[in-house]
Structures are given as structure tokens and as C-alpha cells.
Image (cartoon, rainbow, N blue to C red):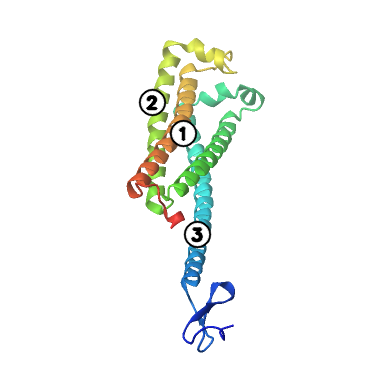
């Protein structure tokens, strides 16, 4: 292959490698160096993608567990503060066995699980895309969601309590147990207002957390470049 070349020159061999005309050994040229760089970059990209996927699964699972626990805890708290909430909302269970409180706690945990899955998927996908799927940004995002959900739950409970006092017929119409003799409009208002407020606060908190992650991404990468393209 190198017999037609002057001594000391190189020829381009298979796979882009250059061969010395003196000894025939492979000498890595520009193309070989570029191939090596591309291979390293692709390996790094695959490693980062796998790591991001694992973190996304962990975050989604953690959100499901935390939200389910929080949903059950909120249900227990509402049952203590407003004992007439679950018998008024789940009147069919209350009439058939009196297990409305236990049924409501189960529903609260299931709603928390469902909300946690939705928030976890949205949060993990967004943080991963904005290269913010690390410990501190994740804790910050969950803290924002918890804070807004708590504030919205308190505000919603107060609003529902006020509606139950000044317009009790409203809840008598919108819930199934409104015609029961032991129906308590204020308890139903507190429960409905707090639960709906928590859901709304969690959704708004997730959107705000994603917006903050996007803002941090723009500050750290003003040209939109991320380590995924490095």
C-alpha cells in the first residue's frame, strides 16, 4: 500500500487511519481524532441520558409516595377539624354503614397518589430538560409546591367556611348529603375548599417551579446550550 509513496509519507488506510510508509504502523490523523471525540461525546450523552432517566423515575416515585402520605394526612386533619365533611360528601357510605370517614381518608390518599404522579412526571421531565434534575433544584421545587399547596388549602378552607355560614344552601345543592338531617354546611365548605385549594396550589406550585427551573437554565446557558449537546 505504501510502496508507491515516498519514504516518510503516509497513506489513508481503512477506517480513516493513516499508515506510515516507513514502518507501516497506524498513525492517528485528523479523522481518527475526530472519530474518537465523537465516540466519547456519544458515550457521555448516553450516560447522561440514562442517569437523567433514573433520576426521573426516582423523583416520580417519590412524588407519588409523598403526595399519597400528604393526602391521607390532610384527610385525617379534615376529619378532625370538620367531622361533618365526609358524611356530607359521601352520604351513601354514611347511610349504609357509617364508614364515611374511613372512605374519605382512602379517597384522600388515592387523590394524593394521582396528583403526585402527574406532578412528578411533569416536574421530572421539565427539570431534566432544563438540566436541573439535581438534589437542590428538586428540593427547591418540592418546597415551592408544598408551600403553595398549604397556603391555598388554608385559604380555600376559610373561603368554604365563609360560604357555609353565609350561603349554606349552596352546599345543600352541590353535595349528595345536602338533604340529610345531620348535614353541616360549614364542615362541608371547609373540606371542599381546603381539598380543592390544595390541588390548585400544587398545580400552580409545579408550574412556578418549572418556570424557576427554566429561568435558571437561561441564566446558566444564555445561548440555550446544555450539557446534553456537549
Q: List the single residue furthest toward the bottom.
A: 23
Are there few (<14), some (14-19), or many (20+) residues within 10 Å of tag 3?
A: some
Marks 1/3: CA–CA distance: 32 Å
95 to 25, vertically: above or below: above
Give the x, y percent position of residue 79. 49, 30
Query: Foreground: 46 or 222?
Result: 222
Q: Which of marks 1 and 2 is in front?
A: 1
The residue under the point 40% across, 40% down is 209
Which residue matches tag 1?
203
Query: Foreground: 61 or 43?
Result: 43
N-terminal of the pair, mark 1 or mark 3, is 3
Q: In which quarter of the image is the C terminus?
A: bottom left
Give the x, y percent position of residue 142. 41, 43
Which residue matches tag 2?
155
Q: Quadrant of the N terminus?
A: bottom right
176 to 110, vertically: above or below: above
Query: Foreground: 216 or 60?
Result: 216
Marks 2/3: CA–CA distance: 46 Å
Q: Which mark is residue 108?
A: none
Q: Which of marks 1 and 3 is in front?
A: 3
* Residue 102, image quadrant: top right
Give the x, y percent position of residue 216. 35, 45
Q: Is mark 3 on a helix, strand or loop?
A: helix
Q: Is mark 1 on a helix, strand or loop?
A: helix
Are there few (<14), some (14-19), or many (20+) residues within 10 Å of tag 2?
A: some
83 to 116, vertically: above or below: above
Marks 1/2: CA–CA distance: 15 Å
Query: Foreground: 51 or 190?
Result: 51
Q: In this view, does 40 lie to the left or right of 110?
A: left
Which residue matches tag 3?
45
Q: What element carries label 2?
A: helix
Amino acid at each position: 500500500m505504501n510502496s508507491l509513496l515516498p519514504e516518510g509519507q503516509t497513506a489513508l488506510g481503512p477506517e480513516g487511519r493513516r499508515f506510515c510508509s516507513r514502518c507501516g504502523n497506524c498513525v492517528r490523523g485528523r479523522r481518527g481524532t475526530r472519530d474518537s471525540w465523537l465516540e466519547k461525546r456519544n458515550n457521555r450523552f448516553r450516560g447522561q441520558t440514562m442517569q437523567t432517566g433514573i433520576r426521573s423515575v426516582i423523583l416520580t416515585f417519590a412524588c407519588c409516595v409523598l403526595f399519597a402520605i400528604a393526602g391521607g394526612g390532610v384527610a385525617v386533619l379534615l376529619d378532625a377539624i370538620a367531622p361533618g365533611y365526609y358524611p356530607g360528601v359521601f352520604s351513601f357510605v354514611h347511610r349504609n354503614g357509617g364508614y364515611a370517614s374511613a372512605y374519605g381518608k382512602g379517597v384522600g390518599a388515592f387523590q394524593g397518589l394521582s396528583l403526585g404522579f402527574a406532578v412528578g412526571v411533569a416536574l421530572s421531565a421539565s427539570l431534566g430538560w432544563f438540566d436541573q434534575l439535581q438534589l437542590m433544584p428538586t428540593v427547591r421545587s418540592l418546597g415551592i409546591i408544598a408551600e403553595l399547596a398549604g397556603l391555598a388549602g388554608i385559604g380555600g378552607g376559610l373561603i368554604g367556611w365563609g360560604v357555609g355560614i353565609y350561603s349554606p344552601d349552596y352546599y345543600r345543592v352541590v353535595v349528595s348529603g345536602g338533604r340529610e338531617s345531620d348535614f353541616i354546611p360549614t364542615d362541608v365548605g371547609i373540606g371542599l375548599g381546603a381539598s380543592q385549594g390544595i390541588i390548585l396550589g400544587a398545580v400552580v406550585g409545579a408550574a412556578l417551579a418549572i418556570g424557576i427551573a427554566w429561568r435558571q437554565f437561561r441564566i446558566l446557558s444564555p445561548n440555550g446550550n446544555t450539557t446534553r449537546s456537549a
